[in-house]
Amino acid sequence: MTQRTATLTVDGNTSEYPVMSGTHGNDVIDIRSLGGKTGMFTYDSGFLSTSSCQSRITFIDGDKGELLYRGYPIEQLAENCNFLEVTYLLKNGELPNAAQKSDFENTIKNHTMVHEQLVKFFQGFRRDAHPMAVMVGVVGALSAFYHDAMDTSDAEHRSISFNRIVAKIPTIVAMAYKYSMGQPFMYPRNDLDYTANFMHMMFGTPCEEYKPNPVLVRALDVIFTLHADHEQNASTSTVRLAGSSGANPFACIAAGIACLWGPSHGGANEACLTMLEEIGDVSRVGEYIKRAKDKNDSFKLMGFGHRVYKNFDPRAKLMGKVCAEVLGELGLENDRLFKLAKELEKIALEDDYFVQKKLYPNVDFYSGIVQRALGIPTSMFTCIFALARTVGWMTQWEEMVTDPEYKIGRPRQLYIGAARRDVPPITKR
Ligand code: CMC
């Protein structure tokens, strides 16, 4: 087949660029030679039209509302696999067989404890610090604790780092919570599976044994699966960019956590619940919808809209189902905020403004309500997201450092500041 090309004409000069096709999704124009051929760069603030890498991990079809991990639809993975199987899939490219699954689960289970010295690190934070601030610090600090396997060119070292962070991140999230509550840290329990153990470390106390409810454990496990990876989103791109300099992987994950914290990204689940609390009652939904549409008001409906999904977010559909199951299990079907969320969703979906701008509920719309029902405080919501996304970040980091085309990330700019000028003497300023 002949190579397709895109032709660019600038000031009468024409240059050609190869068109590349992937397995699914939009073709891309390979403009790596653009600077050399034209002396120009492209301008794409917010990377609306830029592919930063070739990837084999996750694919989103925003129009169809489809999300695939290694080719498998998210609905099938959420239904048939647990989070550690999905983790294995993302890491290795294939689902595990029974022996591989058991082996991987044992490896993770046996590395859940953190260095005892890390406890002291927590004590340096104020108790009222936001748990995401604590996470940024503590996860970054892991790079100082586990420096025995840090040769990023060594596959074995990278695999150890992957397993370490996946095993320890639930322990760290639970410690951040316990620290904020002034409660003792709970050591992990190897007789529990990944998610049940996390719930034990979150909600257990040394005073009595914590008995995880299987329905709630399964719900949280599905939440983890839904958040595990999501293509080249802001935090993943942050991890890749930080890692592109050869930085320590734990430090890169800390950078990803910092990015995720923002309300336009992972912080939206927390912001969504705060918004629902602020609206307070179904009778005030109209007033808030009006504000969301007002150009002069900075208020946005949190949990609505997505850069890529322009039809529906498949994660939100699954999350809605999980939400109903959890509320049913806990007898909270008449929960005030759940009813309010349903009404808000209904009105927004029928409203011309939201229809025309293709604004649909995203994963964060329901995840806050589920987490609240599970007993997780609002300030911890984004930490739960970070726990799950750590798997995607590490997978994407691994893919980047093993890519033969791997280069340090270094975007260009269009400079619009002051033209070159000379420093005047102080008497003339
Ligand atoms: N409420 C009201 N108007 C909105 C909203 C919203 N939630 N989202 C977008 N719009 C409007 C926006 O004002 C803009 O209007 P106009 O064309 O008149 O300027 C138009 O829709 C396009 O929005 P945009 O902000 O240019 O779109 P984007 O692709 O850059 O942003 C987004 C996507 C997710 C940042 C944005 O929809 C948003 O801020 N949503 C609320 C926060 C949220 O729920 N974030 C979670 C994302 S999913 C979790 C994750 O994967 O991280």
Image: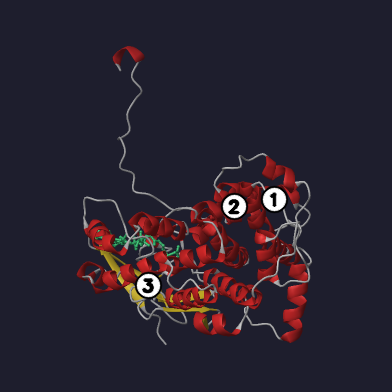
Residue 99 relative to residue 56: left or right: right
Q: Quadrant of the C terminus?
A: top left
Relative image position of residue 118 (x, y in whole percent): 73, 48
Residue visible at 24% across and 62% down in the picture = 286
For the residue pair 93 and 79, the one nearer the viewer reads as: 79
Res. 125 in view: yes
Residue position marked by numbered label 3 in the rendering: 309
Res. 405 in view: no
Q: Quadrant of the N terminus?
A: bottom left
Secondary structure, mark 3, is loop
Q: Nearer the viewer, mark 1 or mark 3?
A: 3
The three-letter amino acid code for the residue at tag 3 is Tyr
The image quadrant that residue 387 belongs to is: bottom right
Residue visible at 71% across and 86% down in the picture = 97
For the residue pair 408 and 23, the one nearer the viewer reads as: 23
Residue position marked by numbered label 1 in the rendering: 143
Residue visible at 51% across and 62% down in the picture = 372
Give the number of the disc on residue 107: none
For the residue pair 418 and 329, the one nearer the viewer reads as: 329
Secondary structure, mark 1, is helix
Residue 53 relative to residue 360: left or right: right
Residue position marked by numbered label 2 in the rendering: 254
Question: Which is nearer the N-term, disc 3 or disc 2?
Answer: 2
Residue 49's place in the image compared with 26, above or below, is above
Task: Check whether the beta carbons of the residues at disc 3 and disc 2 lie within 8 A of each other.
Answer: no
Question: Which is nearer the N-term, disc 2 or disc 1?
Answer: 1
- The outermost residue toward the top is 427
Relative image position of residue 298 (x, y in whole percent): 28, 51
Task: Check whether the beta carbons of the residues at disc 1 and disc 3 lie within 8 A of each other.
Answer: no
